[in-house]
Image: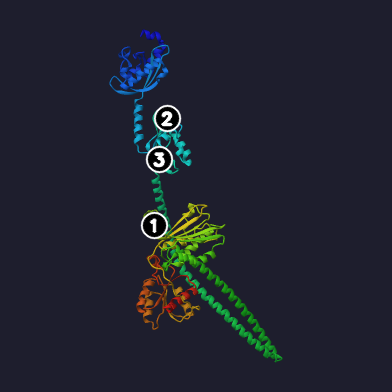
Amino acid sequence: MAEIEKQLPESIYRDFFESARFPMLLIDEDRTILLCNKAFENLSGYSRYELEGKRKWDIIVALNDELERMINFHIKRRIDPTLAPGEYEFKLKDASGNVKDIALNINMLPGTKMSLAFLQDITEKKQTETWYKAVFENTGLPSIIIAPDTTIVKANTEWALLSGYSIEENEGKLSWTQFVDKDDLEKMKKYHQARRDDASSAPRKYEFKFIRRNGEVRNIINSVTMIPDSPYSIASLMDITDLREAEAERKKLEDQLQQARKLESIGQLAGGVAHDFNNMLAAILGYSQMVQIKLKNLAASLANKKGEIAQTLDNLWKDGESSTGRRESFFGNVISSMMDFLDKIDLEIENLKSSDEMIDEVIKASKRAGELTKQLLAFARKQTLELKPININSVIENFEKMLRRTIRENIQIELHLSEGIETIEADTGQIEQVILNLALNGQDAMPDGGKLIIRTENKMLDSSYANSHEGVFPGRYVMLEISDTGVGMDKDIQSKIFEPFFTTKEKGMGTGLGLATVYGIVKQHAGSIWLYSEKGKGTSFHIYFPISAKKVNSGECLLYDINNYGTETILVVEDQEQVRKMTSVMLRQKGYKVFDAATGDEALKIASSCREKIDLVITDVVMPGMNGKELYNEIAKIIPDVDVLFVSGYPMEIISHHGILEEGLNFLSKPVTIDDFTKKIRDILDKKKCL
């Protein structure tokens, strides 16, 4: 000890050995412990009296291989301090036999043969590191250890698989920032920094888009944990791409279902309004046309009478030329008065013509209103369809000329019709309406011209497609695709595009019923329609019609009486009094013999007791008690070969049967013009001539 005190100033002894909080040793050249402080006593469990000058530090080294390594370092350090590391770790065995992890810092004291060693107990740190390593390697999640400068210090196998880079390519070479989508990068940097500054102030988990080596984008939830007493952090990732896609698919289906329900509710309302409105329009249109006919007949009659009177006056004037005196004066006064009367007739004729023009405007307005209600009924899926097997390619080819006349010349129309197209069961007129409405919609989207493409194709829709599209069932379909190269539409417009009265046009430029009508027609054909559009990249409508096993009919025989007059006997059954009276008067004016009834029971009594053969029954579909179809079935038992024409604004049985009449039955939708009505009657009555 005296030798030590000679070589070491007292201040160093006291300051570095007695007051130090960390364990310290002074070691002689033969590894004997010369001095130890209180902190080392606490660490080792030995007292200084057991160690100082008596024991070598070999006693505290737990592992033989580490002892050999440390002795080798000690020998080299004495020869040249640069030949051995000044810092390393070893396992210390204390007086009780407990093993501890120690970090050692040892240096030769200048001018002496002694070494000064500083020890730090890193057992807890090592245990933590071991735990983190076990978690890191066995978590099953892609994980990395990140340095403060964002470098990836360590990566596990799962991370390598996710990133597309090997572990060797990751560790010490790549930054985690290069895997983050640019839109998420700043947010991620802020989160990481916040976790370092104050872990409690930032969320442990957050979502971002991960860019793999091959450019694939994955949705990731990232969990960041700071390693205690370390500037490093561990990031563990969970790939939730499939989950997000499933959520998006579910949200898509929920939106589709909500939209379908909303359109269904609107359709029910629109259908009810259209039905009542059609009944009123039927009376307005019918009576207006009859008044117009009477006005024209009256004007013609007055013109004829005027001609007769003028001729009579001319004869009187000639007779009066040979007379003189009072007789000449008398004829002059009479003729003058009659000429004034003729002028009044001219005025009345002009008034009648003016009234005729006003009635004509009423008729035009009624027809426009009727078209509006037809569109509403189409949207509501309450039109009556006359279904028959059709080849949709033939429908498109026959409709092409009319379509080209309708669409502007600066729009190129292309047809891509698949060969061997399957048969579908549809109403040809309604399919043409769908094509026209979508073509006009495409035209509006291409103000500067463009391309309109109509395509057909046989399609097999599998369960995967059906599961992701509300209301679709797996099976074989015919697809009708109508696309344009126009301005496209954003998601907000797409969500409303099939709603009635929704339009992007300026006020007065459209009713907003074109696409709503398309939607209703497609749904009424048990089909589905899907919209694909992007702003600035055009729009494409895909319509799927279920195929039919029926064969397409070769042709039909149609005969029309150009005058629309007849002498047959007709039974009119209508519960609306105004419509019934108007229909009866109109038919009688056309030469038909008419019986009318307000109810089914009343009509059956007429059919049973009528001495004359009834050729045609014209009946409303929906009536109190017995409906039109039931009535016709009963009358057919009495008069087996009687024909029928169903007329209605809102056929209730169509709802229960999805709006479909049996093939071969005749139907007209209210309101209908006198000309169309009487043509339809003649068509029905004359069909027997084709047999």
The disc labelled 1 sits on which kind of residue?
A: Leu
The disc labelled 2 sits on which kind of residue?
A: Pro
- The quadrant in which the N terminus is found is top left
Residue under pointer 3:
162
210 is higher (above) or lower (below) than 578: above
Taking depth in this image into account, of 665 and 500 the one nearest to the observer is 665
Residue under pointer 2:
231
Identified at 67% across, 88% down, the residue is: 317
403 is higher (above) or lower (below) than 221: below
Marks 1/2 in contact by CB < 8 Å: the verdict is no
Mark closer to the chain start, 1 or 2: 2
Please identify, in this view, whether the residue under mark 1 or under mark 2 is nearer the observer.
Answer: 1
Identified at 55% across, 77% down, the residue is: 295
Give the CA distance from mark 1 to mark 3. Answer: 33 Å
Q: In which quarter of the image is residue 509?
A: bottom right
The secondary structure type at the circle numbered 1 is strand
Number of numbered labels in the structure image: 3
Relative to 249, is 329 on the left or the right?
right
Marks 2/3 in contact by CB < 8 Å: the verdict is no
- Does the image show residue 62? no
Residue under pointer 1:
461
Give residue 44's position: percent from left, percent from top: 32, 19
The secondary structure type at the circle numbered 3 is helix
